[in-house]
Amino acid sequence: MNKLCIVVGGSKGLGLSLVDQYRTEGYEVWDCSRSGKGAEHVYVDLSKRESAIDAIDRFFADKAKATYDEVLLIVNAATLTPIGPLSSSEPKTWWDHIDINLTMPISIFGRFQTHFNDASCKKVAAFVSSGAATGAKDGWSLYCATKAGVDHFLRTMALEQAPLKHPIECVSLNPGIMDTDMQAAIRQADESQFSQVERFRAFKTDGVLVSPSIVATNIFNALHKPFENGSTLNVGG
Ligand SMILES: NC(=O)c1ccc[n+]([C@@H]2O[C@H](COP(=O)([O-])OP(=O)(O)OC[C@H]3O[C@@H](n4cnc5c(N)ncnc54)[C@H](OP(=O)(O)O)[C@@H]3O)[C@@H](O)[C@H]2O)c1
């Protein structure tokens, strides 16, 4: 079997565990990020949307020339910055956040359709979402809004794809709480910026954060059995 897995944000945390998991399973795996390394890495800075979409476009066009039995796209990259009410940060930082977490995920899923709609193999477009997509948290307004936005985009994309001859299956993944750099950044927040910061610090000291490798295995298993098109799957530990 000739299987392709593309992880946007595969350089660390859950993304790196996904890269490892799918390589172990025999996939050709590519990471699109800023700090990834190796031959199967595409440099992409999602806060620079024009150069980022050009790089993604070239990469998708190249991969679409080959014939695969399965093509899986997982958009995992995200930022939490800036944390706090918007009165304490500048619009430029909001726009970077929105580009990384919303504009670019939607653009990447859009270009995935452009390049892979005609491919007749199994195709999956997956988005790593968050409980914050449905549960509002003070200090995380951009993150909550952007995660909810991409989830809803994928529900709509699922409807658009369903009647096509070779539809892409769409799914959001809620990974629960994992022991990664993103959690470390949350613990650094000031209580005036994020009222639940003590609770999140306790997640670490109480040992309840889950290893991203466990979540990556859960994702692999969840995507290799039937799931409802456009749904959100809980893949936490
Ligand atoms: N950790 C948790 O508890 C938790 C909970 C719920 C949901 N999630 C979600 O799970 C996913 C993975 O989170 P994580 O905890 O593994 O995060 P992480 O360790 O901070 O890794 C984030 C990934 O996103 C990439 N990324 C960030 N900014 C980017 C940019 N401007 N351009 C390109 N890539 C960028 C990073 O790559 P580079 O830095 O190399 O560019 C990295 O590969 C995220 O979608 C997050 O929202 C995490």
Image (cartoon, rainbow, N blue to C red):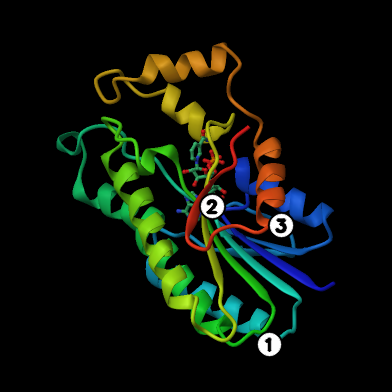
Q: Is residue 181 left or right of residue 133?
A: right
Label 3 and label 1: CA atoms lie apart by 25 Å
Q: Residue at x 41, y 16 (%)?
A: 199
Between circles 2 and 3, the one closer to the viewer is 3
Q: Give the image location of residue 44, x and y in percent.
A: 52, 63
Closer to the chain start, of discs 3 and 1, is 1
Q: Give the image location of residue 86, x and y in percent.
A: 19, 39
* Callouts 3 and 1 close, C-beta under 8 Å: no
- The amino acid beneath tag 1 is Lys
Tag count in the figure? 3
Tell me the SS state at disc 2: loop
Near mark 3 (Cα within 10 A), the count class, few <14, some 14-19 or many ≥20, is: few
Q: Say which of 60 and 208 sits in front.
A: 208
Q: Give the image location of residue 171, x and y in percent.
A: 52, 58
**What residue would you read off at disc 2?**
76
**What residue would you read off at disc 1?**
65
Label 2 and label 3: CA atoms lie apart by 18 Å
